[in-house]
Image: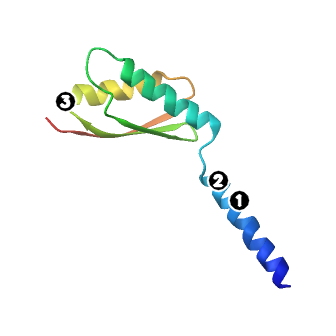
Amino acid sequence: MAGYRRFSHCFLLVIVLISCAGSPQDEAIDRAVTRALIDYEQTNLNRIDVSADRGTVYLSGDVETNEQKERAEQIARRVKGVQHVVNKLQVQP
């Protein structure tokens, strides 16, 4: 009985860890959004932290203007695979 309980706990732990790990699609989205922000030449958007989870992109960090905040969201929305953008950017002039 103890062996079965230990097995079931280990199995549950593996399931939890797998569900917490980012999918390959999310990792690709993360890289693509980060690259698009870095490549945007009109303003410095390369200090923005990007994470993706199930097609939702989360932007965080500081930008200098509201225009930069809006532009970062627009750039992220254009990336293939992005379904939603949660913009947590803070304007810090």
Vertically, is 67 above or below 30? above
Q: Residue at x 46, y 27 (%)?
A: 33
How far across and down, in percent of the image, does residue 38 sit? 37, 23
Name the residue carrying label 1.
15
Q: Residue at x 38, y 24 (%)?
A: 37
Please say if the residues under marks 1 and 3 sit with CB atoms less than 8 Å apart: no
Q: CA distance from mark 1 to mark 3?
A: 42 Å
Q: CA distance from mark 2 to mark 3?
A: 36 Å
**Numbered label attached to residue 19:** 2
Q: Quadrant of residue 70?
A: top left
Hey, what amino acid is under mark 3? Thr
Q: Residue at x 59, y 53 (%)?
A: 20
Please say if the residues under marks 1 and 2 sit with CB atoms less than 8 Å apart: yes
Name the residue carrying label 3.
65
Q: Residue at x 19, y 31 (%)?
A: 64
Q: Quadrant of residue 2?
A: bottom right
How far across and down, in percent of the image, does residue 76 sit? 43, 27
**Numbered label attached to residue 76:** none
Density class for disc 2 (Cα within 10 Å; few <14, some 14-19, many ≥20) is: few
As helix, strand or loop, the secondary structure at mark 1 comes to: helix
Of the two numbered discs 2 and 3 on the same chain, state the one appearing first in sequence. Answer: 2
How far across and down, in percent of the image, does residue 18 sit? 67, 53
- Between residues 8 and 78, which one lies in front from this camera angle? 8
Q: Is residue 82 visible?
A: no
Task: Say which quadrant the C terminus sits in.
Answer: top left
As helix, strand or loop, the secondary structure at mark 2 comes to: helix
Hey, what amino acid is under mark 1? Ile
Work out which residue is located at the far top of the displayed protein and give it. Answer: 41
Density class for disc 1 (Cα within 10 Å; few <14, some 14-19, many ≥20) is: few
